[in-house]
Image (cartoon, helix red, strand yellow):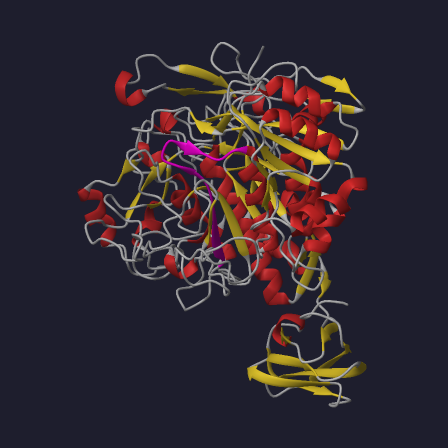
Amino acid sequence: MKKIYYKIAILFTVFFVSCTDTEMVTTNELTTPVTSIPADACRGELLIKFKPEVADLLDQAQTRSERGVMTRSSIPTVDEVLDVAGAYHFERIFPVDVRHEERTRKRGLHLWYLVRFDKDADLQKIAQDLSNVGEIAAIEYNRTIKRAYNTQKRPFMLDEQTKRAIAMCTSESAERPFNDPGLALQWSYINNGTVKEAKEGTVTVGADVNCKEAWKKCTGDPSIIVAVLDEGVMYTHKDLAQNMWKNPGENDVTSPVDNDGNGYAGDVHGYNFVSGNGYISWSEATDTGHGTHVAGTIAAVNNNGIGVSGIAGGDGTDNSGVKIMSCQLFSGDKGVTLFAEAQAIKYAADNGAVILQCSWGYNSGRSNAMNYTPGPTTDEEWASTTPLEKEALDYFVNNAGSPNGVIEGGIVVFAAGNEFAPMSSYPGAYKDYISVAATAADETPACYSNYSTGVDISAPGGDSWYHCTEYGSILSTLPGRGTATPDENGSTSTDFGDNYGYYEGTSMACPHVSGVAALGLSYAVKLGKHFRAEDFRKLLLKSTQPITYSDESKLYYENWSVNGTNHPTRLQLSDYVGQVGGMIDAALLLNNIEGSGVDMKVPNIYLGTGKTTTINLATYFKPGNADFTCQVADETVATVTEIAPGKYTVKGLKSGLTKAVATAKLNGGSATTQEFYITVRTNAGGNGWL
């Protein structure tokens, strides 16, 4: 049987292993992988989706559970099998979050459960027996996602001479609009035709994502949240801390109490889905710094006089960049199971993220079987073999964002993969997501990058084998050497320094697209624009420059740092023409946003008596508006109180309906008004409906 491998999209063959048998057995109108056990299946564990008809029974069992964990389902036919298996743990996969339970049920995610039983039980037989139960709709083995690369492999770090040289580049200039010294080496943002030590003829002016022009219009907005599903992001890094997402309902990563009721305790800057707590880590001996590197490309703090720049990292003033939410999937040698991966995806949507940054995936289905184990080759194959993963991603696409915000739905961005293959890896190849190929500093395809089927767009990912220098890779933030993770008391040691270094791969191309998407949504906020996710995804893919090649081929030198340039390999560029999408262009996206989307409107508000909610009127008016007022027609029904310029608290007083008028007055100019309605009901909760 062939195995399918999960891999992280870094050039030095970094990948997560995830095996599944592609043969299926159809039983009781149920397709389940029960013919053989994947090598990495968790013994004594299965993922089960029930049919809607038994939802009430499952809910009743849930009410009798302790913190959502049970031992039985309350469905006799299911429990008979669980009794034989020695089941001791029965848990709904997606914890109840009262804010979003309605939409969770609408998507059917409340029907997915994890069951744990005797590890010595016959896993295949238990799966087969459960597949014969009429109340069950789907079964999956709970596979463990592992990394199968040399964890001693480290990124290329800046040498002291280079650090001293770029330390001199702290002043802003016409070429570099920010004073971050490392921006001089971030050719993927602003390419002036020079890459340190690069082989002659391998660098082209303008082979970048065009940040220089885009930054003239926008540098980011804190209302845009990007979820990084990866290793833990070093949230204390001095070039990231200001742009880390902060959960307003939590303040202690070690807290065992879920203070905000979202189903996850201690999730201050995100959640560690490996260990199952809010204690995000990045300093295990075998951590690579991958998550921190990705985060820096998206949102390293700009114009702070240190380190590097981020595509949507703001302008250096407080709270001006987009926010990074860390959803940790890997820690040291450990990786999550599909159970926790699906939780992470839904968590991101339910807690405000609108972009899902995923520099990982299965091997390409057309990768060379001599070197890799090919993954899925069609949308149907991937969706049928990983239904839980597919449903979680669908939830993000359809339920992230808000109909009253800048985007309704979410944008999912994946790395295309590094197997030199003529097909993107999955899940990125799926039609509703964005798959990113990697380019070198002259816009030629990176020698390792997947291309052709399923690839949507390109971005710089680096190609040191072509440039014959590590400086042809991507520079970004990295965790410091030493113990950088806060201890159980919340303190950090002082024997580490915040570091920066180079990685390459479609893993590095991917956050360029996520960063540009975040910058685009930030600009939409500034303009008071609203988009449906699918419309914004199409606009993003349209905001590219065509990639053309002046030569028929390029030479690269595998492991050049060891082997030198004695044994070149020729890459036929003609094979890539029209097969890698266009090069993402940040400035073009911002220009396209100006003529797209719809103007934001102040939404109607629904809340209960005695309940409050907040509304920021600046979100719903054209830029340039400075002075806001808000008046309620019937103040016996509801009141509005200004708590900051343009920001109001709305409080329900008694059941009823009242009109409200919001007015925005331009500086020294005319006024613009919008009407909206406030509905108050006795039994309504928060700002929701009845």
Residue 168 appears at what percent x and percent y? Answer: 23, 54
Question: Based on the displayed image, in which of its 4 quarters is residue 474 positioned?
Answer: top left
Residue 14: tell me if it is visible.
yes
Tell whether 595 sits left or right of 484.
Answer: right
Q: Name above or below for residue 658 compared with residue 366.
A: below
Instruction: Look at 79% across and 82% down and name the residue there.
Output: 659
Camera-nearest residue between 265 and 600: 265
Q: Name above or below for residue 395 compared with residue 25.
A: below
Q: Quadrant of the N terminus?
A: top right
Residue 375 appears at what percent x and percent y? Answer: 58, 21
Instruction: Look at 71% across and 40% down and name the residue there.
Output: 74
Residue 127 appears at what percent x and percent y? Answer: 65, 22
Boundaries of the magenta span: 322-337
Q: Quadrant of the C terminus?
A: bottom right
Instruction: Look at 38% across and 26% down and name the residue there.
Output: 12
Which secondary structure class fits the magenta region best?
Answer: strand
Tell whether 89 sits left or right of 685.
Answer: left
Q: Name above or below for residue 400 compared with residue 161.
A: below
Camera-nearest residue between 147 and 584: 147
Q: Name above or below for residue 554 compared with residue 281.
A: above
Camera-nearest residue between 351 and 118: 118
Residue 356 appears at what percent x and percent y? Answer: 56, 46
Q: Is residue 327 magenta?
A: yes
Residue 377: tell me if it is visible.
no
Camera-nearest residue between 357 and 188: 357
* Total count of labels: 0
Q: Is residue 459 magenta?
A: no
